[in-house]
Image (cartoon, rainbow, N blue to C red):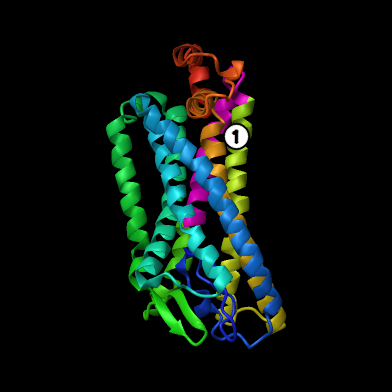
Amino acid sequence: MSATTFMSGDEENTTLWYDYSYNELIKNFAPCDHDNVRDFGKVFLPTIYILVFILGFIGNGLVVCVLVKHRHQTNLTDICLFNLALSDLLFVFTLPFYAHNSVVGGWNFGDFMCRLASGSHNVGFFCSIFFMVVMTMDRYMVIIHTYKSARFRTLRAGLAVSVVVWMLSLGVSLPVFIFTQVKNESQGFSCDYNPENKALKHYNLFTANILGLVIPMLVMVVCYSRIIPVLMNIKSTKKHRVLKLIISIVAIFFLFWAPYNITLFLMFLKSEGKLNGDVCSLETHLKLSVTVTETFAYIHCCLNPIIYAFVGQKFMKRVWQFLRECVPWIPLSSTWNTSDSSFRKSSAVSGSSEVASTFVK
């Protein structure tokens, strides 16, 4: 799952998202004039990449710093949040390379960085998605099977799950590390995922759609559809806030990722000759669509700290305390004056409060 490069001449808009070579998809497309799309991308892509990099680095970096500072109070949820933030950081760290690539129209960082950036991009993406799935399943177990889950929600279990998720993400991304390489084209160097095996050429497209969208969406819908009725029956002032949060998590995930996955699938169908119509018009619209939806999907990694971490009162209190230590002149709002111990006491008044606090800690 890499980004988008723009080549001049016959090498048109070459998208490497999910490390599925867009160059392979458009081999059979008729030669059309896409200068407008290419010129738009040269301005639009670097702007969004750098913006996402800055916001993603600040938000996820803040989550990591706060959790490291309070590592002695870590629980399973904090471990998942920490790894989710690390995954998104790994993801956004590759964006400056692709921003430069989009501006100059070629890859200037060598073969090693080509493989490393593409592979890291892919690992960061899958790891982020998998930890969102783990957090969803954890919430489901805590709320639906409260007593059974207590014995399994240990620090050791959290570390074991983290190792498994990172190894699984690395395994899924292994073909990207192996088959991505720098190629010397007529117009310059390009960084492409280009295996000789046809099945592997389609591998990243389908793993991204199945593992990156379909399965996570199914898990979220199934788990949260069971959680919502339980929330509606509890007596807690937080339940409506939690309900809004659940709807936001599912809706944001779908709205940010589905358009791009759908566009990629349409591009695949076009390359296989399954879509009919005006070839040049269809090709232009698909290229413009992939440029816009790709960058739109990237923004999701900037929202993860907000919908998974900053939404919690306890976490925000820690954030303000951390910022005040780093920047002493920042005033600490009276909203966050409650101590951790008193917050835990107020959150543990009843089972209902504990259920709600699973989401907004």
Q: Nearer the viewer, residue 186 or 26?
A: 186
CA neighbours of label 1 inside 10 A, class few (<14), some (14 to 19), many (20+): some
The magenta stretch is 212-239
Q: In the rendering, at what x and y percent does residue 299 appear? A: 59, 51
Query: Residue at 38% across / 66% down in the picture?
Result: 113
Q: In the rendering, at what x and y percent does residue 288 appear? A: 67, 70
Question: Where is residue 285, by image quadrant?
Answer: bottom right
- Looking at the image, residue 93 sits to the left or right of residue 111; the answer is right
Q: Most extreme residue toward the front, as rendered?
A: 329
- Looking at the image, residue 72 sits to the left or right of residue 191; the answer is left
Q: In the rendering, at what x and y percent does residue 202 appear? A: 45, 72
For the residue labelled by badge 1, is the local secondary structure a helix, a strand or a loop?
helix
Magenta-colored stretch includes residue 123: no
Query: Residue at 57% across / 56% down in the picture?
Result: 50
Give the amino acid type for the residue marked by disc 1 in the picture. Leu
Magenta-colored stretch includes residue 232: yes
Dominant secondary structure (helix, strand or loop) of the stretch shown in magenta = helix
Query: Is residue 224 among what the camera can see?
Result: no
Q: In the rendering, at what x and y percent does residue 247 appear? A: 62, 39
Query: Is residue 223 among what the camera can see?
Result: yes
In this rendering, is residue 353 above or below 148?
A: above
In this rendering, is residue 287 above or below 132?
A: below
Q: Nearer the viewer, residue 152 or 55?
A: 55
In this rendering, is residue 8 above or below 99?
A: below
Query: Residue at 58% across / 86% down in the picture?
Result: 10
Tag 1 residue: 245
How many numbered marks, from 0 up? 1
